[in-house]
Amino acid sequence: MIFVNPDCYQGFRFPSLGMLSIAASLRANGLPAHYVDCNFEPDWKQRLAALVREDSLIGITANILSIKPALELSRHIRAAHPDARIVMGGPYPTVEYKKLIPEAADIVVLGEGEDITARLARGDALEQIPSIAFRANGGAAANPRTGLIMDLDALPFPAWDLGTIPRYRLPHTRKNPVLPVMTSRGCPFNCIFCGSDIINGNRIRYRSVDSVLAEIDRMVNSYGVREIQFWDDNFTLNKNRAMELCEGIIRAGHKGLCLSIPSGIKPDHGDDELFRTMARAGFYFVCIAVESGSQEVMSQLGKKVDVSKVRETIRSVRHAGILTNGFFMIGLPFDTRETMEQTIAFARSLPLHQALFFITIPFPGTDLHRLVSEKGRFLYSDEQQLYEDGYFMGRASYEMPGRFDAALVEAMYKKAYRSFFLQPGRLAALALKRIRSPKDIYYLLIKGLKVLFKGRQF
């Protein structure tokens, strides 16, 4: 099977952890696997053409950020390799498979893909493979989904050797090359705006600490990785496990290894002991998913956060010497002008180094999408335009009558960035903490100016 990672050209280029995890499972089952990364391989069309055989299976991953380039990739494959069968997977295809089959895909894997894709690659009858949708009678048929993969230690490490690791260099990391790792899957909370459970479910499953330490050792010693990003939904939720893992990393003595958490940790969870240990292990950057400064709004999101404890968590992270970045959402379905102003004021008051504000978008498959369908008004009839323009250009994608309209949300979004970053000393303090090379100047200042003065997402 050939896995092709679409070029997510809006600055979110990453190697595909999911695809290479599935590729590793195929190889563990004695099945061939190849990987082509359009993000990092300028000659990807030539590489793909050299790999394709008659009736090849070609896998494409897609989430909200990459669905547009994924569809462009699908069209290229249909034109250049018409005999190949396209298999899509990821959050967007799992929810919207009826929109993708048969034009963009022949088969869609629903949910976790390691076991299911191996059965596809073996050639099992489609009707007998659970957790897939496939072309049937001119449309799409879907088989019942299986349960989650509970024993994560039974899965092989991702097949990073299929990729081009020296090219995995990102502008916003401290060191390169960089790779991601997940030490757990799933989240026990039910945030209405989050689609994480579409693939990983609402039950958190942990890998053993020994397994994670062994993978980190391989990434550093075999692949020359200098920074690792932890993509867990809740890395700090289990303090004892996080402490044990960090202490294991410290004992391993990976000199100069940098660690970061770009996915966000729970904002009211963690203490000085935990974050000091994380700093000793090499964590230098942590995102904190605050979302709202209003307890009334927060309580309706399913996030189960005590807003009164957020400041203390951020203080502990910062006192440990870790760069702090807060996530905030403008235009949540329960927001009003007053609660959005409250969120902006709250963000300004927190001891954060930086903040990212996002205009809320109701992604398919989420409770938020269903809520807007029932009580709100979508502003885009073309969902692809919504994800492309709405996410990246700082535009509202829906309105809630009686609470807010698009103009208010977009005005609050611009105000949030300017209010936060134009505080006296804020940019200087961030520059001292963040800028270590010319690429940091470009990333923070050039992109930052686009946010402050053009209203674009960071």
Image (spheres, helix red, strand yellow):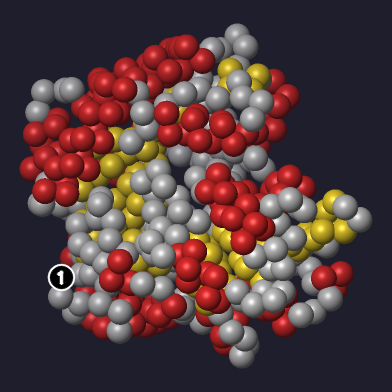
x and y percent of residue 437 in the render? 10, 52
As drawn, is 420 to the left or to the right of 330?
A: left
As drawn, is 7 to the left or to the right of 308?
A: right
x and y percent of residue 372 in the render? 66, 26
167 or 220: which is nearer to us? 167
As drawn, is 78 to the left or to the right of 64?
A: right
As drawn, is 192 to the left or to the right of 240?
A: right
Residue 336 visible? The answer is no
Q: Which residue is most to the right?
A: 137
Q: Is residue 249 above or below residue 422?
A: below
What residue do we see at 47% from left, 34% from top?
391
What residue do we see at 14% from left, 39% from top?
430
Tell me the amino acid under the disc marked 1.
Gly
158 or 333: which is nearer to us? 158
What residue do we see at 60% from left, 74% from top?
52
What residue do we see at 70% from left, 27% from top?
373
In the rendered view of the protein, which quadrant contains the N terminus? Answer: bottom right
x and y percent of residue 352 in the render? 23, 37
Total number of numbered discs in the rendering? 1
Q: Which residue is mark 1?
A: 256
Q: Which residue is most to the bottom?
A: 30
In the rendered view of the protein, which quadrant contains the C terminus? Answer: top left
Could you say whether the residue bearing mark 1 is in a helix, strand or loop? loop
User: What crowding class fits label 1: few (fewer than 14 Cα within 10 Å), some (14-19), or many (20 or more)?
Assistant: few
Residue 9 visible? The answer is yes
Q: Is residue 36 above or below residue 111?
A: below
